[in-house]
Amino acid sequence: MTTLTDGDEGKILVDANGEDIGIVTAVRRDVAFVDPEPGFVEGLLAAFGRTDEDSDDIEVPQDAVETVTDREVRLRDAI
């Protein structure tokens, strides 16, 4: 099982096919919070690990994640 950590903040969340979904803005209690429509500023801040959880973020539970690399968090085929 893949473990989410605060080190995953700023990574791109992609679906099982590699399509971008958004940017991980925060990780709290095994849940990734993802901004599905990051603007230029949010993308730039994410590159430097300076993102914040927002009320519009999507919650992605840890058990929906297949793998985590140094650049992305990839979802399983079926969640």
Image (cartoon, rainbow, N blue to C red):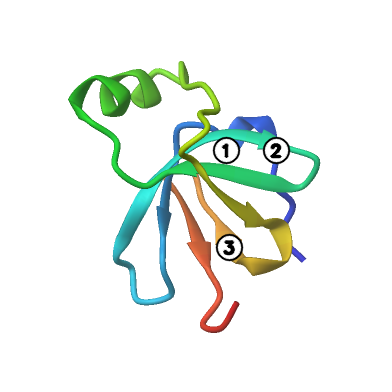
Compare marks 3 and 2 and give the one earlier in the sequence: 2
Q: Quick one: 21 or 68, which is closer to the camera?
A: 21
**What residue sits right under mark 3 in the picture?**
67
Do labels 3 and 1 touch, CB within 8 Å?
A: no
**What residue sits right under mark 1 in the picture?**
8
Residue 79 in the image: state x and y as whole percent.
60, 77
Q: Residue furthest left?
A: 40
* Residue type of the residue flagged with mark 3: Thr
Q: Secondary structure at mark 3?
A: strand
Numbered tag placed on residue 5 in the rendering? 2
Give the distance between the C-alpha atoms of the residues marked 3 and 2, in whole angstroms: 13 Å
Q: Secondary structure at mark 1?
A: helix
Give the distance between the C-alpha atoms of the residues marked 3 and 1, in whole angstroms: 11 Å
Q: Residue at x 24, y 19 (%)?
A: 41
Q: In this rendering, is residue 47 above or below 23? A: above
Q: Residue at x 51, y 29 (%)?
A: 54
Task: Tell me the quarter of the image containing the N terminus.
Answer: bottom right
Residue 68 in the image: state x and y as whole percent.
56, 54
* Residue type of the residue flagged with mark 1: Asp
Q: Residue at x 80, y 41 (%)?
A: 29
Which image quadrant for residue 27?
A: top right
Compare marks 3 and 1 and give the one earlier in the sequence: 1
| Mark 3 crowd level (few <14, some 14–19, many ≥20, 10 Å Cα) | some
